[in-house]
Image: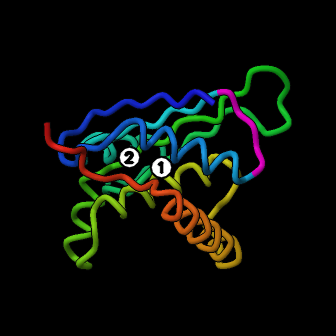
Amino acid sequence: MDVYIFDHQKALPFSHATVQAIATQVVSSEGQHYDEVSIHFVDTKEIIDLHQKFFDDPTPTDCISFPLDEPEAAGYKVLGDVFVCPEVAITYAKEHQQNPYEEATLYVVHGLLHLLGYDDIDDTEREKMRDAEARHLKSLKKLGLSLHKPNAL
C-alpha cells in the first residue's frame, strides 16, 4: 500500500517511514487491502478550519478522516485521507503527563480505523473502536512502531 504523508506542521518532528509502517500494519491487520492512503499532519489552525468546514464545529480536534473507496470496490482502491493535529497531541500529553508521540500515534491509528469503518458515535461502537485502538497500539509497540523524535544528526 502506498502511504502518502503530507507534513504541514513543525511542532512534532517524526519519521515518515514510521508513519508508513504504522499505516500499512493497521490496514493489513484489519484484513483489508487498499492501494493507497494519505495522512496529513496539520497545525491547529488547519484542523480547526477543517472541523468548522466539514462538521460545523470551530474547535480543535485530534484527527479527522475522509474515507473514499469501500472495501468491496473493484480495481485500484484509495482508503482515504486522515488529518492529524500533533499540536493537540502535545497539549493533551502535557495535561495528562503522557508522551506526545504516543498520543499522536493513537491519533493516526484512530483516523485509520475510521477509514476502515469503525465509528465512535454511540457507546457500543465507541467500545469497539477503543478495543481496536488498544489491540493495534499493543501490536505496534511489540513491533517497535510508534511515532518518535528522529535521531539527531
- Residue for point 31% across, 58% down: 101
Location of residue 35 (image quadrant): top right
Could you tell whether 56 is left or right of 46 in the image?
A: right
| Residue type for callout 1 | Phe
- Residue for point 42% across, 31% down: 5
Could you tell whether 95 is left or right of 108 in the image?
A: left
Split into 4 quadrants, where in the image is the C terminus? Answer: top left
| Residue type for callout 2 | Gln
Q: Identify the residue under disc 1.
A: 55
Could you tell whether 149 is left or right of 120 in the image?
A: left
User: Where is residue 58 drawn, in percent x and y?
Assistant: 32, 52
In front of the other: 37 or 66: 37
Mark linked to residue 147:
none
Would you say residue 59 sits in the magenta stretch? no
Q: Are marks 2 and 1 in contact (CB under 8 Å)?
A: yes
In front of the other: 60 or 82: 82
How crowded pointer 2 is (Cα within 10 Å; few <14, some 14-19, many 20+) is rated as some
Color theme of the render:
rainbow
**Residue lying furthest left:** 153
**Principal SS element in the magenta part?**
loop
How crowded pointer 1 is (Cα within 10 Å; few <14, some 14-19, many 20+) is rated as few
- Residue for point 31% across, 47% down: 48
Location of residue 92 (image quadrant): bottom left
Could you tell whether 39 is left or right of 90 in the image?
A: right
User: Where is residue 75 drawn, in percent x and y?
Assistant: 81, 20
Q: Identify the residue under disc 2.
A: 52
Mark 2 and mark 1: Cα distance apart in space: 6 Å
- Judging from the image, what secondary structure is the residue with disc 2 in? helix
Location of residue 144 (image quadrant): bottom left
Which residues, given as a range, are shown in magenta? 31-35
